[in-house]
Amino acid sequence: MAVLVTGGAGYIGGHMVLALVDSGEKPIVVDNLSTGFAWAVPPQAKLVVGDFGDEALIARLIGEHEIDAIAHFAAKIVVPESVADPLGYYLNNVAKARNLIETAVKGGVKRFLFSSTAAVYGETSAEPVSEDAPLHPVSPYGRSKLMVEWMLEDAGKAHDLRAAVLRYFNVAGADPKGRLGQSNPGSTHLIKRAVQTALGRHKALDVYGVDYPTRDGSCLRDYIQVSDLIDAHMAALTHLRRDGASLTVNCGYGRGYSVLEVVDMVKKVSGVDFKVNIVGRRPGDPAAIIAKADRIRAELGWRPQRDDLAGIVLQALDWERRLHNRQPD
């Protein structure tokens, strides 16, 4: 049996592939390499360059490799871009996910891990926010992820399909062994952009709004280290393989840092006092969103091992240096 990983040549999906390989499995990766990299896939995994919405391709892989679980990471993820191009996001994140789910059902795959997001909560007064909070996504990105959650819930009622929905908060850092990190040069993730700026890749870092109702006026976010996040996925996979019921869990630490606090930490860790520009708010950004993470601990036994902002920043900084010095394939 094997796990099919969509988006497994990217940042988070790539870390899932490493974890599966480390546990002795041979994952099958489907990635169109639009934001991922072939070199990010270890030789112990099989990379198939293609579209996760291609039903014929996915059906063939399920049959050839006896796929028993799908871990779905492939998606468009930039909130402002989703506001500008909602139909593109609904095509990629929703319509193609629908094809993937249907192909899984037809192929007899009974386990599905879904990469969801805290953006499904939208603007919320709850701090921290629990999985039972009202769902009011404010961007097409958040709405697209919620639509897939609904599809999985309905498909699970109609078919023998159990799903683990993992709602990510802000993912950051890199593999502690130095094998992988956030590699897309166009990434909009705060810590990625900040360490790039510290290393001179950008002239300045833009901070989008300091007029929010938070302690310093900048947005508050819950930053989770990427390998801790993947530990949650592996625990969810074990849960489903033991015939556990479908579940939805937040993936975060339950503590928030403001954008300005993160910027200060990057300056401290890097030793570089880089320029910061205060600009207007981005569309679709809530003021604060922090996880209530009791359920994932109770139901999956998950315990974070890398809850340290300075350490997360150092990992990102080290990876950015490795990426800059990387030799071409």
Image: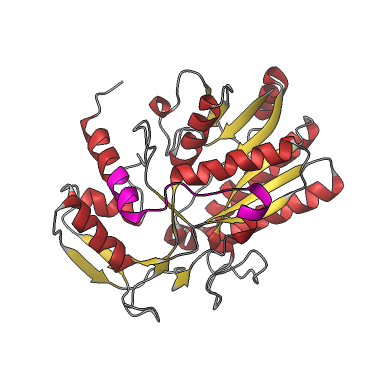
Is 70 above or below relative to 28?
Answer: below
Q: Main secondary structure of the magenta part?
A: helix
At horizontal 68% and vertical 33% (from top left) the residue drawn is 69
Is 160 above or below relative to 90?
Answer: above
* Count of number-bearing discs: 0
In percent of width and height, residue 146 lies at 64, 58
Is 165 above or below relative to 239?
Answer: below
Is 109 above or below relative to 275?
Answer: above
In the image shown, does 26 or 308 lie closer to the viewer?
308
In percent of width and height, residue 73 lies at 55, 42
Residue 278 seen in the current view: yes
In the image shown, does 293 or 106 lie closer to the viewer?
293
User: In the rendered structure, does residue 314 fall within the stretch colored magenta?
Assistant: yes
In percent of width and height, residue 258 lies at 35, 68
In percent of width and height, residue 310 lies at 30, 53
- Is residue 91 found left or right of 273 in the rendered image? right
- Is residue 306 found left or right of 138 in the rendered image? left
User: In the rendered structure, does residue 96 fall within the stretch colored magenta?
Assistant: no
Identify the magenta region.
296-316
At horizontal 57% and vertical 46% (from top left) the residue drawn is 92
Q: Quadrant of the C terminus?
A: top left
Residue 49 seen in the current view: no
Residue furthest to the right in view is 158
- Is residue 98 found left or right of 140 in the rendered image? right
At horizontal 79% and vertical 47% (from top left) the residue drawn is 155
In the image shown, does 280 or 16 lie closer to the viewer?
16
At horizontal 72% and vertical 40% (from top left) the residue drawn is 240
- Is residue 136 found left or right of 49 in the rendered image? right
Q: Quadrant of the N terminus?
A: top right
Q: Residue 176 occupies which quadrant of the picture?
A: top left
